[in-house]
Image (cartoon, helix red, strand yellow):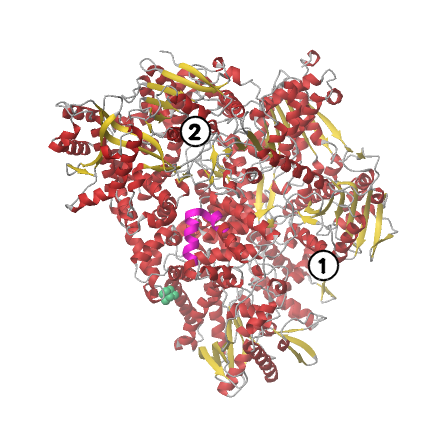
Amino acid sequence: MTASNKGETIRHEMIMASAGSGKTYQLTNRILKLLALGVEPERINALTFTKKAAGEFFDTVLAKLATASEESEHAAKLASELDLPGLGRDDFLVMLARLVGRLHLISFGTLDSFFHRIVRNFPFEFGLTGDFGILDEDGVNVERRRVLQEVFHGYPLKAEVYRRFFEAFKQATWGTEERSLVRLLNRFVDENHAIFLRAPEREKWGDPERIWPDGSPWLEAQSLPEAELDALARIAEEKPDLNDKQRGRWRAFIDGVRQWQPGAPFPGDVKYFLEKCLREWEPIGRRDAVLINERRREVLSPEQCKRLESIVKYLVGGSIGASLRVTRGIYDTLWQYDVTYSRLVRRQGRLTFQDVLLLLNGRFANDEDSSGLTLTQTDDPTRLAVHYRLDSQYDHWLLDEFQDTSFEQWRILQPLIDEVIQDPTGQRSFFYVGDVKQSIFGWRGGDPRLFRDVYSYYNQWDRDVIVERRMNESRRCGPAVIESVNTVFGNEGLFRELFPKETVDRWSAIWDVHGSSRSEEIGYAALYEVENEAERFASTVGLLEEIQPIEKGLSCAILVQRNEVGEQLAQYIREYSNIAVTSESDIRIGRDNPLSVALLSLLKVAAHPKDSFAWEHLRMTPFNECLRRMGFDKGRLIESVLTQIYREGFEATVAAWIDKLNEVIELDRFSQGRAKELITAAYFFDRLGKKTVAEFLDFIDRYRIRDVEATGQVQVMTVHKAKGLGFDVVLLPDLEGKRLAQRRSGLGVQETSEREIAWVLDLPPKEVREMDRMLHENELTSEAEACFERLCDLYVAMTRAKQALYLIAGRVGSSKSINYPKLLDRALASSEARTVGLGQQRINCYYEAGIPEWYQRLGGEPPREEAGREALAEEETALTESGRELKPGGQRLRRRTSSDASQSDVLGDRLFSLETRQAADYGTLVHWLFEQIEWLTDETEQALEASLQRSSAVSTDQKTAALNEVFGCLREPTVRATLQRPSSPVEVWREKRFEIVMDGEWISGVFDRVTLIQDGNGGYKEATILDFKTDRLSGETDVDRLRDLYSPQLRLYRQVLSRISGLSESRIRCRLLITQRRQLVDV
Amino acid sequence: MEPRIEILPWDRPLLEQAVEWLARDLPTGNLDLSRHLIVVPTREAGRRLRERLALFAAERQSGVVGPLVVTPEFLVTYPLNERAVADRLACLMAWTRVLQSMEIEDFRAVFPRDPVERDFHWALQTGQMLDRLKRSLAEGGLNISDVNRICGSSFEEVDRWEALGRLEEAYRAVLTEEGLEDPSEARNSVSQAPSLPEEVEQVTFLGVPDPIPPAVAAAEKIAESIPIRVVVLGPRGGEALFDEWGRPIKEVWQERPIPYPELEKRVHLVDKPLQQARKTERLVDEYSEPECRVAIGLLDREVRPFLGETLSSAPVFDPEGESCERHELFALLEILKRLLRGRDYAVCGELIRHPSYFRFLRETLPAFSLERLLWEWDDFRERHLPATLDEASESHGAGAARYPTLNAVLRLIRTQLEPFQTEPFSKALSEWLRALFQQSRVNEMGEDGEPFLSAAYSLMAWLKSLGESSFLTEGEGGLEASDWLELLLSVFRDERIYSERPEGAIDLQGWLELLWEDAPHLILTGCHDGNLPESIVGDPFLPDGLRRTLGLKENAGRLARDTYLMEALIESRSGNGRIDWIVGRAANGGDPVRPSRLFFQCPRKELPRRARHLFQEVASTDSRVAWQPAFTLRPQNAGEVTRLTVTQFKDYLACPFRFYLKHLLRMEPVDPWKAEMDPLDFGGLCHEVLQKMGEDPGVSDTTDVRVIQDLLQDELNRCFRARFGNALSAPLLIQKEALRQRLLALGEQQASERAKGWVIEAVEWAFEKESLLFPAGLSVRGKIDRVDRNEQSGELRVLDYKTSEQGISPREAHCRKLTGQRAVDRPQCAYFQWADQSYRWIDLQLPLYVWVARETFGKDAWSGYFNLPKAKSATGVAIWESLSSELVDAALECAQGVGRAVCDGRFWPPVERVEYDDFESLFFNSVGSSVDGDYFEQAQR
Ligand code: SF4
């Protein structure tokens, strides 16, 4: 730390960083600057969204410090970047040392893990029970099934609750499949539970007062207007100028309306006039409407208008009414589900990250009392408690990808940040960075509006509390790519023409013209328009073959909107070219190859032999041969597999059967790889502590792996996955799809400005929505929102390209739908097309920037990967060479305990008997008493009694019994004789341990009692080994049985004693004292 | 007497030096160490020492007597049976009792929020946390109430600890009342007045860098009467680096550089635990006989499973043993617990699949077949969807013939559960287990006999403790058997099973054991910060800050200790040996991990290089392999076909190969998750009800809607009751309601059909025809749902009930007009010309019915569907008006074709794309490439 830096403060800062403009760079430099200013690393909290990014921050910071502390040149450069020119190598070294010395305290992690940490340390405050764990997606699925089962079966017990639930569910699933309810309910919960969690209050669901505070004219007419229908029917029949077809239309309409149940979709015959009426709604009101009926104009009479008006009101009103009811039904169903879920899962400490958030926000439907901890109203004590239990107090906050932060997340952070901002010393700071144009995680809660809101909030009283910086110079994309981006996204006029106003206003506020710092490579960007999907795929292959990116050492990605398209495209490329391609979508290892499926059939048969599908399938596979060789029929298979599963787990079972298969066929490399992955998956399953095959199959079915990250291959992936990455060449052949301003499907939700949900409604059909002002407004907002996000998607996709970008879209033609192809066509296309030849194909290119042959100037560098491989191989050999010289350490032995020698089989019956256990304890006690006796004297009995008194470990009954048994022995003359001190010099061992090696085995044991007669020269003359046996006996023969049982053990003792004492074995006497019989037996 | 500290120079491993050192004062010959008490850090270290002593003595043709080798724990627990110390079970029970009986309002500082349910489960879980807390504090010789005393009143959490202190008091009171003492407190008082076995004349602390403070306190007292020597592996003359108890001095060691040899070559960076294991394996593979040459240090238990039971060159041995939680006995009791709790039918299913249980069944029931039992269990479940054991046993007396084994087993299970309601828990459980294992000798349980025995012993020890203590049994009235079992399992779960070390094995050692390892080559896996040194950041009770204040083991102390240990490991291999450190970059779940701080214990100037090495990017060494199938399927020959049912034609026309799989191999999956009726059940139940309607003359002849509907409803209720009992689950109730709606709608239609003159002539009219039309030996079977005769016109019609969601038009369901150049991929006989148009048969059901009617009644009949779909408006009879005699003949021609093909065994080639593919899971890319077609065709000949 140089003196010049002391006392320098650091500003709060917001950075809006366009794609590729060096967001990570800014963030890591900020951390470095803090460190340079002397901030302790553990006082910095840098949070982002992915684990990977979090890991990279830290690595980058460290790498920068390492380089700067090694070379002055780098030090100077970094110093100037940090705007702390006084810093030199040594300063960076000090910083590095401080950083690595505190590794364990540094929390550069994900937001999720930060919140998780808080909850984990406050279990009682959050009313949680037991050990705390995060549920992953798979865990949620499993729990959901359990909860639903409970919901299903809990109900017959409580008729009233059940009735409500039943009604609710019926309403909520109006008009859907009745025969696979379980699946339906599962999906239903999956789709709507998140909304429920955000709006757990009943009154927010389907309450007309909330949706239409001023009332809705539609809701008045909800009953079938019989009279109007009759009247309308009469008019239609009597109207003179109608032909049969037209009259038929009216009849069908009237019948249709009669049949229609509110909530059901409108039948075609009803829709026919309904739509026309809605379009002519005003004239109908004026009673002078004209409709087209069967391609002919039909002038409606005023009475007809009036009747029709009532009927349409009924249709619309009935529809909305049904929606309201269904919404409440949905609520009730979700509520039931959530109550059960909370009890069985959440409050047992198994939480999803979403739950953690809500917990910290203090909102759970089923928590009647909301005392305890909520972080959103953090007062001082709570905040202190958080610091204290987390062992951390953060002075400096850095939030990355801020546009993806959700409102709930922010509500938790805000009090902590407030504190930072209000800190009077100026020694604390807040920094956030992101790009609103890359807000593509709205579907999981990301709230891009926060970006500006937070800024305005802190700056409302005092401008410049937070400094704003914008960065628009891309270090990733070349000039041609940037040009195309500017052309598409900077065309406000066009946007205004195509998109909702709100969308355009938002976009314009964040849009700045981009620049590129890669001026040395111009690169290329182009828009191709082709006829159909087949051509889009074909031209993709054509381009790849033309450019040959991998040969040239270029990274290349094909970005798609949906996983399925990615899969198809990858498949297509593999089929029609030799280009190495990997699809980044998740692989379901349990399903995608015959080996896995066969193995799962095997397990299925074992648990469910009735499954003839699995069994017959198994018999078609080489496993059949395994079974034949092993001589296994179905019965043997079942027993063997089930036994192995319970004894050794699924991992071992799966591995064992793959081994068996390997004896029958030779597995190719791919299948070997899958086999390993299956084994790994099974290991993870075993860790869940489950044993049922059905659960395992279910687990494997959902188990997915990501393809290994592949350099040296063309990568197909979704735009979402590509976020944060950059590639030399990017192809976008999957741009088709619905219009951009289309609301996301699902429940209609209206938010307040505080991001609270104001109301929820299961929306009525589109034609109805359009008739109602509130619903229509809601729709427009959702559309604008969706449209904005879709623009972000495209922005992210296009800005992944470093050098070249190929947009491959279908012909727009006369289509009115405003989708990506339309946007690109309008924004980029010139009227004249250039024809490009790709192999056989001729393609129309409507837009170009940069140099079409950009790739031809590049040489053929080998892909990096190979180099890495070689290095690895080298390292391996080096290791091998040095391995051999080591002398082995100490020898290891097989171990035996002396009692092993006399081990008999244990009968389960005895093993699990409480009496056996008691007898064992009793035996220990008797042993212990004997151990107390050195030599028998007159005081022995008294002493024993006294020492037994002190021991409180056993029951009094047992004590008395044991004492009596010992006393009984002591009064037996033969026994007395062995325990009395002999006249010759003697040594006695009691409970003496020994360790010895015999026949290469290490034997440990304990002598109960050994008397050794000394020979006066430090050696022994003879010895007696006495072993106490407390076995319970019946009948005379048992003594012989005992002797047989224990003689191996005593023979071993004799050998051991002989070795240790130097006495020959013949001078060692071995005796058993059978305490129950008070009998001494020689062995 | 002050303890005397002695340094063993660390240029050689501790173990061999320790043995030499112990033997040095002894006369040759016998190693009589029986007056020695040797304190070593861990159980395994003691084992290693005794083994080595035995070897040492063997070289002198002798053995070793004594010594008493103990862990520091011993000094504060000896002599055990002089105090009535509560065992873990008693402690938990005491906590549980306190937590259940407390007035939660009085403890708001601890429990600001009410738990979901203050039931036994909650109390036990919470009790476990408090028990752990108490034990953590006890490591420093503290009680909960000491915390506030030490921290003073300005302490942030003073109220909370005050409340915790009161809980502790209540807990202590419960124990005292039972004449028991808390184990940690007992240890504390022992440490004030320790005693040793009388023969001990010499105490030696041998290589114990980190004894627990109470043990040190005890040792200080002991040192007043018995000489204590402290032996430390360390640098020559380095006495000043350690305190008098051989603990590395924190201030000295936490800054001390560690001299890693060849760090860049020996520290290996890999990706995840799996890769760590692979790397380890490669390193071990350098040796043909790795035993005694290599040992593996497991610093991160996540790596353990990937190492498996054997590496390619040697088995591995984990002295940590295996947790009882993974033992089959635990699994068995876990099942029992859930069975006691909910008596679920599904849990019964788990029980009968447990090897111990099915073995027992085989020994108990005459002619028992597990396969049969499992078959019945699934079959019963699929038909009756029982929720509980009791539902299953009650409702199906009539199924006795179909489910003989199942019924016997369910009865047995129920009987076996009864004592849990009437007897004391420990007795009930012991009896239950005895019955199960009555016949088995443990050695017959295969090679697992050993672990099984030790698991069983520790289980029974706990069970006995549970049964004996008056304190525990007293409250029995309040607890359910499943609660007792939960309590029992909570202690059983933590027991460990140790197995014998296999010959030639490589040891997997924990960090603290490594000092005692003398294999020259150490491979340390999982060298991550957090494991090495272990660090605690954040805790609900004892965060690091508080630990520091309380003088408990804290991060800085661990750093010092581990620095010492690491240096000792390195130095003791400087002459002969080598260490490889394996560092992963991410945990299994993908969370990034960082290299151990210990790697940065170096002179400053070396830092940058180290940092760059340790934080370098890790290249993935896995490479991608192109997709390839492991094998193709070879379906076996299923034998001759002698009869076809009318509905099977449809399947053949859709795809001959799938027809083969479905009807000849009869492949049919079992859905283990079935919780509601599937479409087949749904239709079946419907048919059952409608059959009743058809058979009831009073109904089939009436035009009164109410009469018909009443009957339908009654029948529906009866069928449901017969099949599913009285307590219907929610999905069944909903399905029943749906069915009811449909039947009501059908009732209306039935009345109006009757009014039109249609009288039901027959229902479920079965036929089997051997006809000249078909190849010899092949018959066609079927069952017509319903035959109607019109009482006015005398016309006949044959009807099939359809319960699909939408109403179906018979014509569309049977044949399809071909347009454009659709692929001609079906069997040839499916195609036909009609009025200059090409058509394809999809189904032949109705034409065949017409044909059967023609054969039987001598005239053609109308035919069609009686639809009962979801929408009321689509309910009713749909007649195939245009089904003429000629068209029936065309259909017959097609049927003949199918018949011939089936008899000739023509099931190949398959149709690649079908509408609903039940066999999808078997095919990849295409059916043709997934099945060995040549083999299959051969097999058919
Ligand atoms: S109730 Fe009916 S279906 Fe169930 S077992 Fe008895 S006879 Fe079979």
| Amino acid marked by disc 1 | Asp
Q: Is residue B759 above or below residue A981?
A: below
Q: Residue at x 69, y 26 (%)?
A: A64
- The CA distance from mark 1 to mark 2 is 69 Å
Asked if residue B358 shows in the view, the reply is yes
Of residues A618 and A261, which is closer to you in this image?
A618
Is residue B338 depicted above or below B694 in this figure?
above
Q: Position of residue B71 (x, y in %)?
A: 38, 26
Ligand 1 shown in quarter: bottom left
Q: Is B928 included in the stretch rendered in magenta?
A: no
What residue is disc 2 on?
Answer: B112
Q: Is residue A215 left or right of residue A12?
A: left
- Up the image or down, B676 lies above or below B690; here it is above
Which chain does tag 2 point to?
A: B
Q: Does the magenta stretch include residue A644?
A: yes
Mark 1, mark 2: which one is toward the viewer?
A: 2
Say whether residue A513 is left or right of residue A681. Answer: right
Q: Depth check: give the residue in front, A626 or A934.
A: A934
Q: Which chain carries label 1?
A: A
Image quadrant occupied by the N terminus of chain A: top right
Could you say whether the residue bearing mark 1 is in a helix, strand or loop?
loop
Q: Name the residue under label 1.
A: A288
- Is B580 located above or below residue A74 in the figure? below
Q: What stretch is highlighted in magenta?
A: A637-654
In the image: residue B440, left or right of residue A736: left
As shown in the figure, which amino acid type bears the numbered disc 2?
Answer: Pro
Residue A486 percent coordinates (x, y): 80, 39
Q: Is mark 2 on a helix, strand or loop?
A: loop
Crowd class of label 2 (few under 14; some 14 to 19; many from 20; radius 10 Å) = some
